[in-house]
């Protein structure tokens, strides 16, 4: 009996490699999201600590302006990081859709391989059956002569 060789095996392997690559990219994007969330929380903590009253009853106008400017800077940084996080989330959604497409393609190739394999096994069975029939016919003819 011959060995089954899937003729689209190389294409299938490429599809699997591409799927794994996309999974890796999604994992990297998840790590970026986590780091951005940590950065956002640290900026918010810095903003909160800046907003607390220092216990001074009187503060100079320069110090008040300094605190206000620092708060604005932190707010702008938070907005920038939130925008970056939103972009990363959008990229992640695109990659997820791409991963779903690659998974569909891989499943199609798996089904195709199953069909080719069942056809191959059927053909091999027919070849074996023919060989058995020929052997039985030859024995029968030799036995009657």
Image (tube, grey):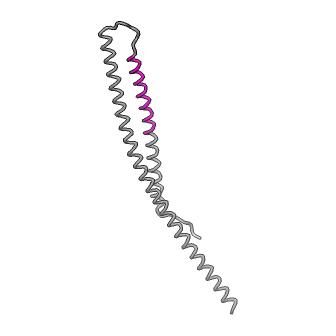
Q: Is residue 105 left or right of residue 122?
A: left
Q: Is residue 83 magenta?
A: no
Q: Is residue 88 left or right of residue 132?
A: left
Quadrant of the rendering where the N terminus is positioned: bottom right
* Residue 139, percent from left and from top: 67, 85
Q: Main secondary structure of the magenta part?
A: helix
Q: Is residue 84 above or below residue 120?
A: above
Between 85 and 9, the one lying in front of the other is 85
Q: Quadrant of residue 141?
A: bottom right
* Residue 13, percent from left and from top: 48, 55
Span of residues in magenta: 29-51
Q: Is residue 48 magenta?
A: yes
Quadrant of the rendering where the C terminus is positioned: bottom right
Q: Is residue 13 above or below residue 116?
A: above
Q: Residue at x 37, y 41 (%)?
A: 90
* Residue 68, percent from left and from top: 32, 17
């Amino acid at each position: 009996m011959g060995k089954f060789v899937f003729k689209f095996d190389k294409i299938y392997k490429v599809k699997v490699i591409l799927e794994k690559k996309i999974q890796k990219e999604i994992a990297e994007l998840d790590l970026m999201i986590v780091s951005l969330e940590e950065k956002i929380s640290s900026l918010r903590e810095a903003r909160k600590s800046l907003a607390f009253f220092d216990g001074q009853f009187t503060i100079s106008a320069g110090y008040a302006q300094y605190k206000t400017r620092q708060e604005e800077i932190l707010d702008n940084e938070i907005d920038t990081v939130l925008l970056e996080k939103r972009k990363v989330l959008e990229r992640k959604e695109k990659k997820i859709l791409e991963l779903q497409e690659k998974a569909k393609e891989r499943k199609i190739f798996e089904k195709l391989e199953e069909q080719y394999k069942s056809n191959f096994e059927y053909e091999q069975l027919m070849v074996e059956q023919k060989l058995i029939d020929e052997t039985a016919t030859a024995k029968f003819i030799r036995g009657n002569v």
